Image: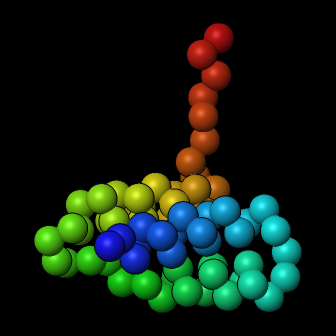
Amino acid sequence: MHPTAIIATVAAGSVMTEGATANAWLQRSCHTSLRREKRRYYDNCLYFFCLILLSGCYQLESWA
């Protein structure tokens, strides 16, 4: 139902592993296009959050 979101989430999780499977998911995520159909909001938001995470720009700031 949400293929773009699943691909992006698995790619973000695969950063914690090594090997050909992790690289394959990262490549697949990079070549996945944004959705334009009915369920695009959830998929595209999760895709962008994972893209920010994978780029290293998504950081938590300390509250103290």
> Is residue 55 something that shows in the picture?
no
Tell me the quarter of the picture where residue 27 sits: bottom right
> What residue appears at the point 78 percent right and 62 percent down from the top-left corner?
16
Q: In the rendered image, which quarter is residue 17 located in?
A: bottom right
Q: Is 57 drawn above or below residue 47 in the view shown?
A: above
Which residue is at the front of the view, 43 or 54?
43
On screen, residue 17 versus residue 22, left or right, reads right
Q: Is residue 18 left or right of residue 9?
A: right
Q: Quadrant of the C terminus?
A: top right
State whether residue 29 is above or below residue 48: below
Give residue 9's position: percent from left, percent from top: 54, 64
Whole-percent x, y for residue 46 in the image: 41, 59
- Residue placed farthest to the front in the image? 1
Q: Residue pushed farthest right?
A: 18
Residue drawn at x 32%, y 65% is 44
What residue sits 73% from the left and 78% below the top?
22
Q: What quarter of the picture does the N terminus occupy?
A: bottom left
- Whether residue 47 appears in this view of the structure is yes
Frontmost residue, 62 versus 50: 50
Location of residue 63 in the rendering, given as x and y in whole percent from the top left corner: 60, 16
